[in-house]
Structures are given as structure tokens and as C-alpha cells.
């Protein structure tokens, strides 16, 4: 078969690897830590190249995952939640784990072990599905729900990622979903080009919390060099079609990653870390702090199932 699935151990990390033998493109997933995408590899003029800024080893991951938040699933909320507090229904809630700035950040599943529930490989694609059952483990989110993630690698370097969440509580629950991968294309971010199809930007206050307003965005609406631009911003697009919502490319080596918001990911958070070696491009179902501001927030009724679909396409001439 053209597509295959392998289980590998690399530097202490237990990986599921989806491979296209014809193009030599492969995607490696780490179920044991937030179902994160560990690598997305393509053959480039200089050899095999991984565009995911990942963890070098199990020790590196355990030390830095909760500091860098590179890669894992964002659920049941995304980005920052102001002071880790919110009201839902007639009750007030506060998360136990907080970031250094006092906010709760990037959800609850980043270091959770997902169970692999299905694997499939054919001549057309390879896929792996994994599941985590959340059971009111944080006082800030005293609910029950399941989160299932399916990665599917197909032709032309296309990697689709579908997330299904189901409310298993007796009452309605708030929900948001997203991802937090960092991408590296060789060299510095300053020399890459980027564009994204988002005419609106979420207005932030000084604490990087949305004010509730959308303001016009005029930057990167066509491919342009990133240069010294610093970004830690959330953008919004109403488009619902097969066009890429964002594209990153490195003119020096031809590497290109395209981002598709196929279903229920209208927000895009982009962050350029100080080292400028990689960039975070985050598909989100809601704006940050949506448990408070309601921007993109989903309310799941008891038993309700909801899904989110995004995709990446990796190309190199």
C-alpha cells in the first residue's frame, strides 16, 4: 500500500507515524501528551525537513510543555482566560492551574494521555484516531466530556485533523477548541513570507484579553515578508470554503505550509516568539477568553456531539 502506519520510539517519545511512501511525506503524532503533532516531514533540496518546532526528547517535553505549550490540543478553552475565572449559568468557576500572568491558559488537555481507538491505512490515506475522557478533573471545569481526534494523511501532503467533542454531563457545558503548533521553515521567521485571509482582528487590551470588538486588519492580506513584525494577535474570517486561510513560505528553500479552516475554526491566532526561529499559527473555534466574552463560544447540550475540522498542506518544489 502507498500509505502506512508505524509505531516508533524516538528519544523516549512513543509516536504514531502516518506515511506516504510515494512522496516520503510523514506526520508523527504523540497521543500520550495532548494528541500533539510532533512532526510533519517532507523531502526538501537539503534532505528530509520537519516543519514542526517540537520537543527533542521526553525529558524536554516534560520540562517545557507547560511553559512553551508547543503543539497540543486546546480544549475546553483556548488561549487566555482572564484570571482563570468565568460565570456559566448561575455559577462562578475558577481554574486551579494558572499561567505566570494569573490567567488560565490553553485548556486542560495539553498533557493528557489520549487512547488510540482506531488506525487505518489504504492506497489513498492513513489515519489514526485517539480519545480522551475528561472527568471533572479541575474545579474550574466540573463537567464530563470526551474529546476524539482523528489525523488523516492523504495525497499532496494534505493532513486533515478532525476533533469531535461530546457532552457527557447532565447539563449544558461551555466549549471551545483549537491547536497550538509552532512551525519552522529553516532560517529566521523574518525572512519568510506569510498571508492570511482575515479582514478582521480581535481587539486586545494590555493583558492580551479581547475587549469584545473586531477591528479592521490591513496586514498580510497578500503574501509579504514577515520582517521584524511581532505578532501575538487573533484574527477573524467569515469565509467557509476550500481556500487556505493562511500560508507560510520560505523563499530560500521553497518550503510552504498552507492552513485550512474546514469546519468551525473561524479564528486564527498568530504568535512570533522572541527567538524568531518558529511561528505559532493556531486554528481556533473561538477568540481568547470566550468563556467570558462569548466570541465563538459553543454551548453543548447533554449528549450533544460537535466537531471541528482543520487541515495542513505541506509542499516543497
Image (cartoon, rainbow, N blue to C red):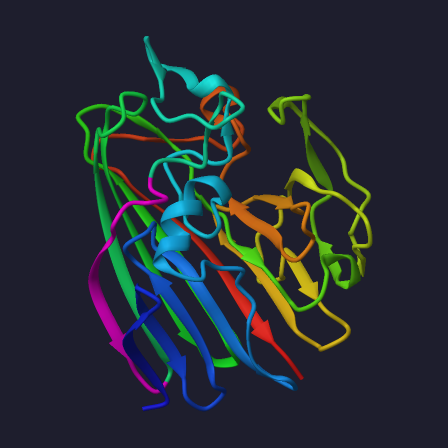
Q: Residue at x 77, y 40 (%)?
A: 217
Residue 5 locus on image (x, y percent): 30, 78
Side (left or right) of 161 relative to 244: left
Instruction: Between residue 198 and residue 118, name the one nearer to us.
Output: 118
Instruction: Between residue 203 and residue 33, name the one nearer to us.
Output: 33
Image position of 234 with respect to 10: above or below:
above
- As for residue 103 lying within the magenta part, the answer is no
Instruction: Between residue 160 and residue 276, name the one nearer to us.
Output: 276
The image quadrant that residue 224 belongs to is bottom right
- The stretch of residues the image draws in magenta is 109-123
Residue 288 locus on image (x, y percent): 54, 31
Image position of 206 with respect to 118: above or below:
above
Q: Residue at x 32, y 55 (%)?
A: 149
Side (left or right) of 43 relative to 272: left
Quarter containing the N terminus: bottom left
Residue 154 locus on image (x, y percent): 43, 77
Side (left or right) of 152 relative to 118: right
Q: Residue at x 49, y 23 (%)?
A: 103
Side (left or right) of 231 relative to 53: right
Q: Residue at x 62, y 61 (%)?
A: 244
For this orientation, the residue located farthest to the top is 90
Residue 28 locus on image (x, y percent): 39, 69
Quarter containing the C terminus: bottom right
Image position of 217 with respect to 48: above or below:
above
Number of marks in the rendered image: 0
Amino acid at each position: 500500500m502507498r500509505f502506512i502506519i508505524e509505531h516508533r520510539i524516538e528519544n523516549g517519545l512513543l509516536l504514531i507515524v502516518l506515511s506516504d511512501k510515494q512522496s516520503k511525506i510523514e506526520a508523527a503524532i504523540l497521543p500520550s501528551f495532548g494528541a500533539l503533532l510532533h512532526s510533519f516531514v517532507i523531502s526538501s533540496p537539503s534532505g528530509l525537513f520537519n516543519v514542526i518546532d517540537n520537543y527533542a526528547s521526553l525529558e524536554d517535553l516534560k520540562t517545557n510543555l507547560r511553559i512553551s505549550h508547543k503543539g497540543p490540543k486546546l480544549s475546553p478553552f483556548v488561549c487566555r482566560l482572564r484570571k482563570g475565572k468565568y460565570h456559566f449559568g448561575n455559577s462562578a468557576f475558577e481554574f486551579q492551574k494558572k499561567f505566570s500572568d494569573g490567567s488560565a491558559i490553553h485548556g486542560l488537555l495539553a498533557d493528557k494521555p489520549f487512547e488510540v481507538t482506531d488506525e487505518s491505512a489504504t492506497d489513498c490515506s492513513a489515519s489514526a484516531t485517539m480519545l480522551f475522557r475528561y472527568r471533572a478533573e479541575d474545579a474550574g471545569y466540573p463537567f464530563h466530556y470526551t474529546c476524539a481526534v482523528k489525523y488523516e494523511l492523504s495525497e499532496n501532503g494534505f493532513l486533515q485533523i478532525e476533533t469531535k467533542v461530546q457532552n457527557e454531563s447532565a447539563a449544558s457545558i461551555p466549549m471551545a477548541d483549537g491547536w497550538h503548533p509552532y512551525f519552522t521553515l529553516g532560517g529566521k521567521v523574518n525572512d519568510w513570507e506569510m498571508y492570511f485571509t482575515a479582514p478582521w482582528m480581535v481587539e486586545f487590551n494590555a493583558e492580551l484579553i479581547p475587549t469584545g470588538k473586531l477591528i479592521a486588519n490591513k496586514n498580510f492580506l497578500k503574501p509579504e515578508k514577515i520582517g521584524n513584525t511581532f505578532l501575538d494577535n487573533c484574527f477573524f474570517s467569515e469565509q467557509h470554503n476550500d481556500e487556505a486561510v493562511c500560508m507560510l513560505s520560505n523563499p530560500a528553500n521553497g518550503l510552504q505550509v498552507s492552513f485550512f479552516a474546514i469546519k468551525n475554526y473561524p479564528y486564527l491566532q498568530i504568535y512570533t516568539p522572541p527567538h524568531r526561529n518558529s511561528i505559532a499559527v493556531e486554528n481556533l473555534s473561538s477568540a481568547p477568553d470566550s468563556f467570558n466574552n462569548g466570541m465563538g463560544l459553543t454551548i453543548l447540550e447533554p449528549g450533544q456531539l460537535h466537531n471541528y475540522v482543520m487541515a495542513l498542506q505541506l509542499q516543497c518544489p
